């Protein structure tokens, strides 16, 4: 059983930065990708950024150039560095890992961008 624990969310002013972390416990051997999704009130959950087991990254168009996903294999941890934050980035951010055939999700961490 894989458990994901996110941290690093909070309240930040527009233009500010936050770094989210997600630590995976349990075996993720053979995983396909780890990543971050987000869900804003009244909207569907959307992909923000993912990183594959070989380090290939993919970003939503809305965050390209502002967010960076990275991974520490030794710690089974994935990070999301978020810069130049906008009010439209306000959402609950969820960490996920795909260990075929299963997808695992964290409990979510709130990110609020507001002055």
Image: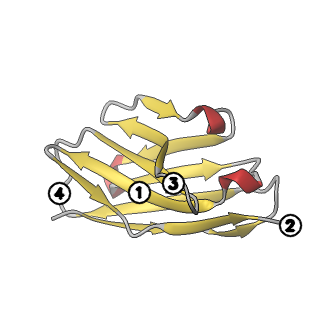
Q: Mark 1 or mark 4, which is nearer the start of the sequence?
A: 4
Q: Mark 4 or mark 3, which is nearer the start of the sequence?
A: 4
Which numbered disc, 3 or 4, marks the residue closer to the eye?
3
Which numbered disc, 1 or 2, marks the residue closer to the eye?
2
Residue name at image x 71 percent, y 48 percent: 83
Q: Position of residue 93 (x, y in %)?
A: 51, 59
| Separation (CA) of disc 3 from disc 2 | 21 Å
Q: Which residue is mark 1?
A: 95
Question: Which one is nearer the viewer's eye here, 25 or 72?
Answer: 25
| Separation (CA) of disc 3 from disc 1 | 9 Å
Residue 115 is labelled as 2
Point out the residue furthest to the front here: 42
Q: Which residue is mark 4?
A: 27
Question: Which one is nearer the viewer's eye here, 95 or 68?
Answer: 95
Quadrant of image for the C terminus: bottom right
| Separation (CA) of disc 3 from disc 4 | 24 Å
Question: Which one is nearer the viewer's eye here, 61 or 25?
Answer: 61
Residue 44 visible, this angle: yes
Residue 38 is labelled as 3
Label 4 sits on a secondary structure element that is: loop
Q: Position of residue 11 (x, y in %)?
A: 71, 70
| Separation (CA) of disc 2 from disc 4 | 41 Å
Q: Mark 2 or mark 1, which is nearer the start of the sequence?
A: 1
Which numbered disc, 2 or 4, marks the residue closer to the eye?
2
């Amino acid at each position: 059983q894989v458990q994901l624990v996110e941290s690093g969310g909070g309240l930040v002013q527009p233009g500010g930065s936050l770094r989210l972390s997600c630590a995976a416990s349990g075996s993720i051997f053979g995983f396909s990708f780890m990543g971050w999704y987000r869900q804003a009130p009244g909207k569907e959950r959307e992909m923000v950024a993912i990183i594959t087991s070989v380090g290939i990254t993919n970003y939503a168009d809305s965050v390209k150039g502002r967010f960076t996903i990275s991974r520490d294999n030794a710690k089974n941890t994935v990070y999301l560095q978020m810069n130049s934050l906008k009010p439209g980035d306000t959402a609950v951010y969820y960490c996920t890992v795909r260990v075929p055939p299963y997808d695992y999700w964290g409990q979510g961490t709130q990110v609020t961008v507001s002055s």
